[in-house]
Image (cartoon, rainbow, N blue to C red):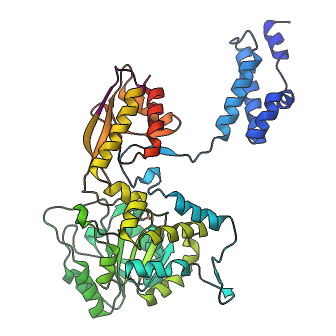
Amino acid sequence: MSDKQRLLSAMPAVDEVLRSTSGTSWLKTYPRRYVLQAIRETIESTRQAILKGEINELVMEEMFHSIEARAQALSDLSLKNVINATGTVIHTNLGRSILTGDVLDNVKRIACGYSNLEYDIPGGKRGKRYSHVQKLIRDITGAEAGLIVNNNAAAVLVCLAALAQGKEVIVSRGELVEIGGSFRIPDVMSSSGAVLREVGTTNKTHIQDYERAICDKTALLLKVHQSNYRMIGFTKAVELDELVALGRKHNVPVMFDLGSGCLVDLKPYGINIEPTVQSIVKTGCDIVSFSGDKLLGGPQGGVIVGKQSLIEKISRNPLMRAVRIDKLTLAAFESVLMKYLDEETAKNEIPTLRMLLQKTEDIRQRAEKIKAAADAVLPDTVKVTLMEDSSQSGGGALPEIEFPTFVVAIKPDGISVNKLEERLRLGSPCIIARIKDETLILDARTIQDSEIEAVAAGLKNAAT
Ligand SMILES: *Cc1c(COP(=O)(O)O)cnc(C)c1O
């Protein structure tokens, strides 16, 4: 018998491996299907290696090791936590807003049992899903009524379908925006069955442009927040109150797609450009829509607030069923909105607001802790410095605002900065950092206190 044949005949059978002590313990940890796949694949690759003459001795221990690693990799959950060291608070790729434990406790409470989701307990009859957040939405925004759907894209779609299907919606050419993830106003418009009537020019739209376009086919005047895009120079947009007055005059409702939708006044923080939802409602704007997981800091959702009669009309549209939110999201919303009854509570307890509004001094202190933890584990040849920098809000919100921050800048030794970034990204936990001027930047704004140790451990593994 040749060496190859001898090795091949010594290979264990799948069943044998499965019945071994290791096999039994894998079955307790990983799904049976993936254990089997790992065994089969490992046996096959070993067989190939033997045939190619790459192996001249069969080490069972190595094979078992390889099977376990494969089973583990196959069973790894795809959706995992990452440490956001980019400083971008509402990072769409990293899940936008994060929620706190107490909000999740409420989600768990509702998820693990039956609930009155669509049941009217006092009446003993069928109830409404949206009733649970009505009072909160009214109390917080000042609007007559509200709804929450799957996301703001869905909110805009369902509003257009309900209020303007087969009719015209007037929009300024300066507001026909595309925001990330292929949400484009003209496309949403055509999907809803409404007809886009563009007015004005790219840089300037006047109230007369809207007025001239109003006819018996007009169903809605729509204003769209420009989100992550700004025009500067020779520009003119119509103020919302002018548009509302025009709508009144012609008996046409006015809708504002506010995008982010901020519920607290940011002026005390020097941020003058983002109107609150409350101030928009106060202008008399008939319908306002905004995201749940941008500046609001809640779960993914699209909030629609406005006049009772229009909200009722929207809630009767067949699309509502397709874009309705689930009970888990609703439970999270109720908890997050509850925090907004007191502005200080909202700013302290909603992570998105807390991270955006935290004092630079507090960020500096956290950056110092990160630097100290990094210094303690990294060799002296790796240069670690504390630097001032600026971070971004993200999520299309407040694009022109630079938030002063403190970062830990790392210049690796022996490996490139790109390699360091990659290793941090591929590590466990995964750390997402940015690169600037040949240094790796860890922004302390979005690194949580509880993650500092993990960041240091990740750096130690990646840099050496
Ligand atoms: C973000 C945004 C949307 C889409 O909101 P999602 O909640 O991401 O669906 C729509 N319009 C504007 C102006 C936005 O900024």
Name the foreground residue: 387 vs 15: 387
Q: Residue furthest left?
A: 234
Q: Position of residue 418 (x, y in %)?
A: 38, 30
Provide the residue span drawn in magenta.
Answer: 377-385
Write down which quadrant ligand 1 falls in. Answer: bottom left
Quadrant the N terminus occupies: top right
Q: Residue furthest top?
A: 2
Decide: is 317 above or below 111.
Answer: below
Q: On the rendered structure, is 62 left or right of 360?
A: right
Name the foreground residue: 191 vs 144: 144
Q: Position of residue 432 (x, y in %)?
A: 43, 41
| Quarter assignment of residue 287 | bottom left
Q: Position of residue 113 (x, y in %)?
A: 69, 68
Residue 1 at least partly seen: yes
Q: On the rendered structure, is 39 left or right of 395?
A: right
Residue 383 is covered by the magenta coloring: yes
Q: Residue sitting at 63 percent across and 41 percent down?
A: 76
Decide: is 153 above or below 281.
Answer: above
